[in-house]
Amino acid sequence: MMNNQEVITEYLRNILPEKAEWEVELITYAQENRVPIIEPVSMRFITQLIKLSHPAHILEIGTAIGYSALSMHHALPKSKITTLERDIEMISQAKNNIAKYSLNNHVNLIAGDALDTLPKLIEEEKKFEFIFIDAAKGQYKKFFEYAMALQADEGVIITDNVLFKGYATGQLTDHNRFQKLGKKINDYNIWLMNNENYHTSILPIGDGIALSIKK
């Protein structure tokens, strides 16, 4: 039997508008190949934020197969998206998807570990009005610290999976690896909520979204 949150999440998924062909294709691929992509309900929220804020430049940390990058592009086609990915198989899939939908001029995929590629973007003095963190959960604090240096003055930083299936609460103990990762995410959440330079709200949408803006 589903709990209240699961019932609500399922309800929200069911009332989303009909998906475009490319969305169905990528979501189906992710499900069949166990590729972790953002929850469609969470993606809907993020694309709404993009439509409201009109960022000229978007940075995504964690491309996977390109589902979120394509979603952000369709939300605001005039934005330029830079997306970072280290997994060789995911890079190949994402490149294929970006090319298939003729988005090479809109989405720039940078291959390599974000902990290596983010400092290069800082050296190049890149700035982004919208930054989306959705990569290695244990590195969230380092990613955010780099994001601070890359964020435009009026920018927004979004972090996904900050509730991590409930394990961030510390109340679930049935899965040892998830429990350890949940503790790291909890530490990140506490650090982020108490960061003196940012206002952050954590929203129980999908697997948890943190929305951070400069004070």
Image (cartoon, helix red, strand yellow):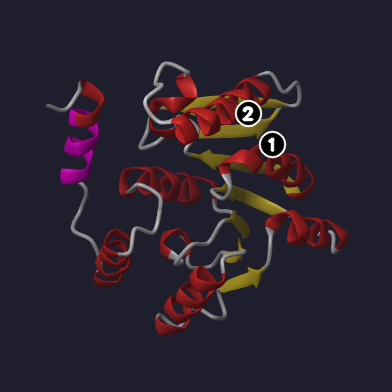
Give the residue displayed 40% in from the left and 80% down from the top: 101
Q: Position of residue 211 (x, y in %)?
A: 55, 34
Vertical comparison of 102 with 72: above or below: below
Q: Nearer the viewer, residue 105 or 33?
A: 33
Q: Which mark is residue 141?
A: 1
Give the residue displayed 30% in from the left and 67% down from the top: 29
- Type of the residue with mark 2: Tyr
Residue denoted by label 2: 188
Q: Nearer the viewer, residue 159 or 20?
A: 159
Q: Position of residue 166 (x, y in %)?
A: 39, 26
Distance Cα–Cα, label 2 vs label 1: 6 Å
Vertical comparison of 204 with 13: above or below: above
Vertical comparison of 166 with 60: above or below: above
Q: Nearer the viewer, residue 161 or 86?
A: 86
- Quadrant hosting residue 70: bottom left
Magenta stretch: includes residue 13: yes
Magenta stretch: includes residue 39: no
- Type of the residue with mark 1: Lys
Give the residue displayed 23% in from the left and 61% down from the top: 19
Residue stretch rendered in magenta on the structure: 7-14
